[in-house]
Image (cartoon, rainbow, N blue to C red):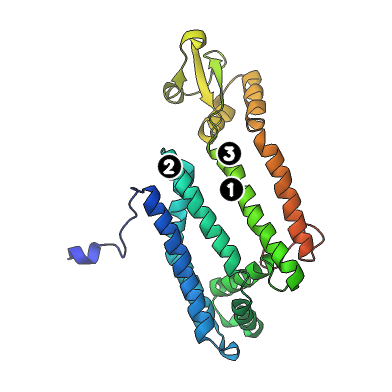
Amino acid sequence: METRAESLPDYLPPLFDPTPESISSDARTVVSKIDQVWDDVVRNVVLNQASIENTILPVAHIENEMRIVYDLIYLYATTHPSRAIREASKAGKRLADEAEVDRYNRGDMFALVDAVLARTQEASVEPEIYRFLVKHHAQFLENGCGLRDDVKAEFKGNLKNLAALTQAYAANLDEDTSGMWLDSIALEGLPAAFLDKLKKGKGENEGQIWVSMKRSDHESMMKFCSSEETRMRYFIEHQNRIPANISLAREIILLRDTLARQRGLRNMGTPQNGQ
């Protein structure tokens, strides 16, 4: 007979009761714990003794341990109803992302990882471990390790700028409240359960229904709406819903191309190691 102790999970489920202060603390914890493991590896491992066991697995294990915390921070940034929580989560994500750029610019750790990859035969380790090793090594290259010192500082700044632009682009999508007022005829074909949840118009919008540009509404409109004209109007409105993201998208693309060329690639579409 199974005892209560045997039926308990190995770890408790996450609690969804954040505060801006707890999110900030969690983000700092993620950064400090991962940084500590990296520091320990660099301090304790000699280059000619670097191995999967003493260099790669500690990093993989701490990343796995911290992943749920990081994922929750990102989840709150995109879904929590409190604006204060969302803003704290975005700040926490920005902190973690910038710390990751700094870590993968560390030449001391890159030297160890590079040595491990050079002496590790793919057939000698489990496939998932070798895959992690290759991707781990590639991430150093993607973050500028191996570049000349006169290029590296600018490259690192560009990486952090790219992360900020990407987050701003995503934040605009997350905060988008745009939509369309449509009457019941235009919305024929949509399930009653879906329509019942939508906002009903009053005053000048009496008799109309508000359909937002959020993904859930978009998927239902494209899948179930019978009117081709309505689908076309809604699709065009959806594609043009955030004008501010047009300039951000252009900056992101140009910056990605600049980063690729700084690394010696022909352009940002050139295949890279580890992909």
The residue at the point 51 percent across, 21 percent down is: 210
Q: Which residue is mark 3?
A: 172
Q: Earlier in the sequence, mark 1 or mark 3?
A: 1
* 2 or 3: mark nearer the eye: 2
Q: CA distance from mark 1 to mark 3?
A: 9 Å
Question: Could you classify mark 1 by the number of other residues whose Cα lies within 10 Å: few (under 14), some (14-19), or many (20 or more)?
Answer: some
Residue 30 place in picture, x, y as percent: 45, 63
For badge 1, the amino acid type reads Gln
Q: Earlier in the sequence, mark 2 or mark 1?
A: 2
Q: Which residue is mark 1?
A: 167
The residue at the point 42 percent across, 66 percent down is: 65
Q: Quadrant of residue 137?
A: bottom right
Q: Secondary structure at mark 1?
A: helix
Name the foreground residue: 95 vs 65. 95
Q: Which residue is mark 2?
A: 84
Residue 126 place in picture, x, y as percent: 54, 76
Residue 33 place in picture, x, y as percent: 44, 69
Q: CA distance from mark 2 to mark 1?
A: 17 Å
Q: Secondary structure at mark 2?
A: helix
Q: CA distance from mark 2 to mark 3?
A: 16 Å
Question: Could you classify mark 2 by the number of other residues whose Cα lies within 10 Å: few (under 14), some (14-19), or many (20 or more)?
Answer: few
* 2 or 1: mark nearer the eye: 2
Q: Quadrant of residue 146?
A: bottom right
